[in-house]
Image (cartoon, grey):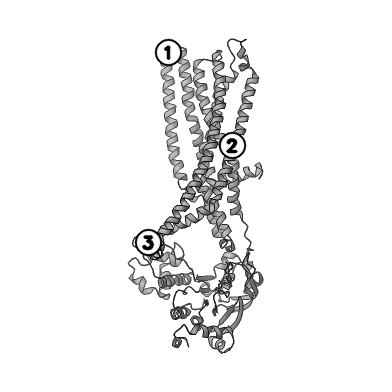
Amino acid sequence: MTAKDKIRLTIRGFQTIHELLPGYLPFAAVKAVLEALLPFINIYMSGRIVTAVAQKAGWRELAILALITVVLNLLTTLLLNLMTRVANAKSGNFWYIADLPLDRKIQTMDYEYVEDSQIHAKRSNITLKRRSMGRGLPRLYWWYFNTGIKGLFQLIFSIALVIGAFTAKPVQTGSAWDFVFSPWCTVLLILLFLLSLCWDVYNQAASTRKGNSIIEGFSDVTRVSQYYYGLLIDYKMGKDLKLYQMRDSILREFESFNSAINQMMSKWQGVEAWYQSLSTVNATVISGLIYLYVALKALFGAFGVGSIVTYVGSLTQFKDGFSALVNMLSDVFINAEILQEVFDFIDMPDKKYHGTLPVEKRAFCDGGDNEYEIEFRNVSFRYPGSEAYALRNVSIKFRVGERLAVVGMNGSGKTTFIKLLCRLYDPTEGEILLNGIDIRKYDYNEYLSIFSVVFQDFKLFSFSLGQNVAASVDVDEDRARSCLEKAGFGDRLQSLPKGLGTCLYKDFEEDGVEISGGEAQKIALARALYKNAPFIILDEPTAALDPISEYEVYSKFNDIVGDKTAVYISHRLSSCRFCDNIVVFDNGQLVQRGSHDQLLAEQGGKYHELWYAQAQYYVSDTLK
Ligand code: ADP
């Protein structure tokens, strides 16, 4: 990575912080300049007062100088206090929002990435460096302002005050120390200063590199430890942990991971401390030389006692500013490498083609003719990185208003069929058409808006019941209530004192309700109905129920979906037998299509085989 790239990344980092914390950066810069200025008020004024005393000035002049010092100090300190409060209020939550650009990316990236563990490893590596070393965006946010800008101005102010020491001429000449007054001595000092700067930059870079490699070596341990910690604090895990008496062993594992992490931290801090000491020695030597220079000049009468006070004070500030600035400069370059990881993640290109065509609003609820037709044309699909086909040569057409059941054994490709239909993945071969147009050509969000899917592993949130149904903070209460009633949750809703305002789970509200698996399914079904999309897909959200209950939920749902297209997925044939249009998947292929009676009549067919294989587990009377 070239220096130009690093500067570009740093500038982009600042732009990102500016977007996250609008108005904070210029404010913090002004505050840092004021912080740098404060000590110089005293340094400069002390010099003036000492000079005045040495020149036997009157008390009036001394009193005015003292008054100016007090007033300047007071004003600057008050202003700084005020600015610090405002700055904290502006940026107090930065630590929590620093990963927001990454989180946004995860929400919008291709689904293929979401299922990719490599992507999650990358993301947690960035977070780890941020949490353990404050690297990435946070470094720009506090380090450069609190240290960098302040250091730069400490340097500027101290050079402005000390410059007189370099130009001052001696009273007497001709001694062996004349060299101190020659321009060569100034050149030598500047060279030594630059040398020391390079040495410090080199050391800082080495320190950060070693720190990074130590932390990266432990990134897997840290991820696992975070998972264990999550288990310990997630009360929903309570039952399983207690019953299987897992808590002690998880705690032991967690502690052993933690002690490994502590070892890593102490190793890293050791490296930091070593390089910090080198930097301190460096800054002390260089400022010692400048002290010596000033002292020798003073000795030969180049300036008076007041200037000595100013120069010595300024030199202390110079030393601090110098070491802060050097630290920051080397840090900019190291931090840019982590910023590169951050922006590589954010810029990860989507592989999917994103079309722009709007989806025609043809649903009845939009005043349309409800004419939607989906066609799979010779579709085959392999998951990324997998050699085996999950779907092979699938061709099928179905129209809005139709009911379709997709059955087949576990692993036969049913969920993959739905994932392709909802464009979570694109087919490897063949195409999927909506009203005759390849679905890739439609605007993705518009296309998604025509589907409501309830997956087997659907999630409800610790929000109010109404918000869960509306999947939004804005709830149309009448619609939410009616959907819950249709989904069979009406009686339970009546029994809840806070109705739709009842919080699910106890994460945030003491009177939040714990809901059963069956109730959760009803809420998830209500959510699908609330979306009012022309296609509703149930991908075995009822798998935890027994086959007869699943049949009841599916067939009841079939009655309430009205004019919508419903697709029912199940590995249990009995659950979908009410449907006139059943497709059978086997080994990624669509092998049969027809009504229950037609399919059962096809002796030797997959449906016939599966039906009789499964029937022995069910109460046969109810399955006929
Ligand atoms: P079903 O829904 O019928 O149980 P799936 O569509 O989930 O079947 O799976 C079909 C095949 O694709 C299976 O062999 C499964 O192992 C494989 N598969 C499913 N998801 C993934 C994935 N994310 N990556 C790789 N292979 C997958």
Q: Which residue is mark 1?
A: 58
Q: Is residue 436 above or below residue 618?
A: above
Give amino acid for label 2: Asn
Front-lying residue, 157 or 314: 314
Q: Is residue 202 above or below residue 443?
A: above
- Of labels 2 and 1, earlier in sequence is 1
Q: Is residue 42 left or right of residue 106?
A: left
Front-lying residue, 367 or 84: 84
User: Crowdedness of circle 2 by 10 Å Cα count: few (<14), some, many (20+)?
Assistant: some
Q: Which residue is mark 3?
A: 506
Pinpoint residue 421: horizontal percent, then vertical percent. Answer: 58, 71
Q: Quadrant of residue 601?
A: bottom right
- Of labels 3 and 2, earlier in sequence is 2
Front-lying residue, 566 or 551: 551
Q: Residue at x 60, y 48 (%)?
A: 340
Front-lying residue, 413 or 23: 413
Pinpoint residue 518: horizontal percent, then vertical percent. Answer: 41, 73
